[in-house]
Image (spheres, rainbow, N blue to C red):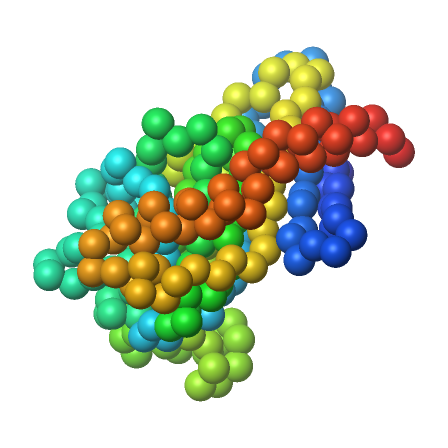
Amino acid sequence: YDRLLNTTWQVDLYLPEDSSNIWYHVTARNLNNYEIPYYWWTNIAAPCHDKIRFITSSKESVNHFFEELINFPWPIENGIDISYPRRYKTALSLFYMDQTEKLPWFSYADENGYGLFHLASPTLKGKKLWYFGYGQGGTNWMDTLSLPGKGQYIEIQAGITETQVQIRPLAANKNLSWTACFGPVSCQAEKAHHVDYQVAVKHTEEKLIENGLFKQLEEIDRQMSSWEDIT
């Protein structure tokens, strides 16, 4: 229960038999007789080192720079391939937009092409990469939030708006819900780390399709949606 907004939120989890993937379904309920501004971001911490690459489809990316959103080149910025966040010294707060994408997804891959994916229904359309940067300030923050000398990580996030400076109106006495999944994904290392970033994007998406995840999302969304009113 959220006292500030007078809302409830429900999270159902589903781990299918013989599966390594975890599905989650979120239901937000506006208990008020008036519209409210709603906000949600799922946050996943992932390891970060020189060989970790963040992979997602994107037609446009913007950087959240203090109070502004500025267009930001992706994946090459000043000659640096920042899909490998560890190469960037200062903080990154990047949002990715792709209006052609029906089911938003992102993943990361290590030096062996192995990593973790997140796939969601269209309501959870926002995609974000956050990294503190490898400078002294960023390193201090990461060590403080984890363990000294072991703090190198990135945050990969999914939200109900395209950026974190937006809210989504939730009508009076209405619900908002979505389904998402995260789990391991194994790609060919040479493709996941191809110099052409789009090769990595296409290959990763093909792996998700090959594993039946896009089809499963539609089926499991229907199944988990039926749980919304179970108390």
Q: Can residue 211 be spotted in the picture?
A: yes
Viewer-nearest residue: 126 or 191: 191
Would you say 37 lies left or right of 165 here?
right
Which quarter of the picture shows residue 84?
bottom left
Q: Please provide percent x and percent y for residue 37.
A: 54, 26
Question: In percent of the image, x 67 and y 43: which residue is there?
Answer: 24
Figure check: 48 above or below 183: below
Q: Please provide percent x and percent y for residue 20.
A: 66, 58
Viewer-nearest residue: 64 or 112: 112
Figure check: 122 above or below 120: above
Viewer-nearest residue: 63 or 137: 63
- Most extreme residue toward the left is 78
- Most extreme residue toward the front is 210
Viewer-nearest residue: 221 or 44: 221
Figure check: 174 above or below 37: above
Would you say 185 lies left or right of 18 here?
left
Give the quarter of the figure containing the C terminus. Answer: top right
Question: In percent of the image, x 50 and y 53: which residue is there?
Answer: 117
Q: Please provide percent x and percent y for residue 152.
A: 42, 74
Question: In percent of the image, x 61 and y 16: which residue is there?
Answer: 171
Give the quarter of the figure containing the N terminus. Answer: top right
**Number of marks present in the image shown:** 0
Q: Can residue 158 be spotted in the picture?
A: no
Question: In percent of the image, x 74 and y 38: which residue is there?
Answer: 10
- Most extreme residue toward the bottom is 149
Q: Please provide percent x and percent y for residue 160.
A: 51, 33
Which quarter of the picture shows residue 90?
bottom left
